[in-house]
Structure formats: C-alpha cells, structure tokens
Image: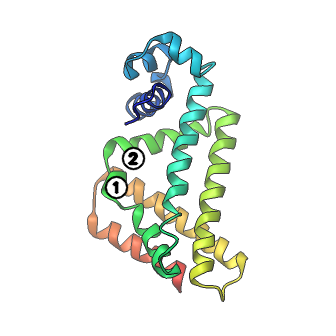
Amino acid sequence: MSTDSAGRILDAVLTLLSRHGIGGVSMRAVAREAGVALGLVNYHYADKTGLIAAALRRIEEQDIALVEPDPDLPAGERLRIALRRVADPEFLTTEYLSLRLQLWSLAQAAEEFERINTEAQGRYRSGLARLIRAARPDLSRYECAKRAADIDVIQNGLWLTALLGLDRAALRRAVKLCEDIALA
C-alpha cells in the first residue's frame, strides 16, 4: 500500500477494478476508496481513462520486476526464480487474480488499454526471453522468444486455474513445465 496520495489513488483504482470491474471505477469512487479529496484525484488524473491507464502501467512494472531477479545470481537460477515467482502466494489471492481478469478484459474496453496491455505483455515476454537466452546461450533469439511466449500462455493459465480453485499440485506441475520449456 502506497503512502503518497498518487500511490494511494492507484491502489484504490486497482482495488475497485478487482472488486467491481471497470464499471466500479469513477473519480468519486476512487477518491472515497483512497481516502482523499475528489479534487486530488482530478489533480493527478484528468479522467477515468487516465486513472485506468496508470493502473495498467503499475501492474506492468510489477510484471517486469518478475523477470528481473537478482543479477548477481547465476543465469539458470535467475530464470528459475522468475518462473517460480508467478506462483508466489501474493499472486494467488482471489483479489489479485480477479484484478488480473479485469485487466485482461480492459484490452477490449478501449484502444489505449489494448495498446498498453499489448506493449506490457511484449516487454514481459522480452524480459523472459532474455533470461532464457542468458541461461541457454546456445538457443537462437527466435527460439528464446518462442519459449517465452509459450511460458507466458502457461503462466496465464496457471493464474486462471488458481482463480477457479487452487490445485497446488497442478500449479507446481505448471511451474515445472515452464522450467522444462525454458531449459530444455
């Protein structure tokens, strides 16, 4: 939870998206959830679209952090850590997984949201491909990108499966499958 007003506002947007979807996000609802004056929300963000775009970018930053583990670790270990992070308990909560579903659906709500989602996914996959290439320098860039795309699909399925009903054994197998794809 952020302590600065802009951060609290973004936290509120993410909470409202998770609970109520895009229909639950308004400047007033965000101000109420963040515990700030409506004028402060309007000061930081021109409109609802700007609020949601900023929230999407915040999630992108979190996603990129997933594929940037400690650079002092050996390449294979950095890759394994990144692949295992998606199954961390913080990402397997109903609130977070509901937020993910809402963010994915936003791509259909507005062209700007689709662009932000597409670019974010591209950056995540590129980061994952770089980790694979560092661990497996014998693979071509194309092969690393292909493996990163396959892993991304499995990871998204892992989150959807966790939302539908936590099957820890299946989640562990999905993480193992991602490791096998990356390192095979």
Q: Which mark is residue 97?
A: 2
Disc 2 marks a residue whose amino acid type is Leu
Given contact means CB atoms under 8 Å apart, are the residues at marks 1 and 2 in contact? Answer: yes
x and y, in percent, of residue 66 in the image:
49, 60
Q: Quadrant of the N terminus?
A: top left
Q: Which residue is mark 1?
A: 162
Which colouring convention does the figure follow? Answer: rainbow
Could you tell me which secondary element the residue under label 2 belongs to?
helix
130 vs 170, nearest the viewer: 130
Image location (x, y in percent) of residue 37: 45, 11
In primary-sequence order, the first of circles 1 and 2 is: 2
Q: Residue at x 52, y 18 (%)?
A: 41
Residue type highlighted by circle 1: Ala
Q: Report x, y in % for residue 72.
A: 49, 74
87 left or right, relative to 110? left
For the point 59% across and 58% down, the residue is: 124
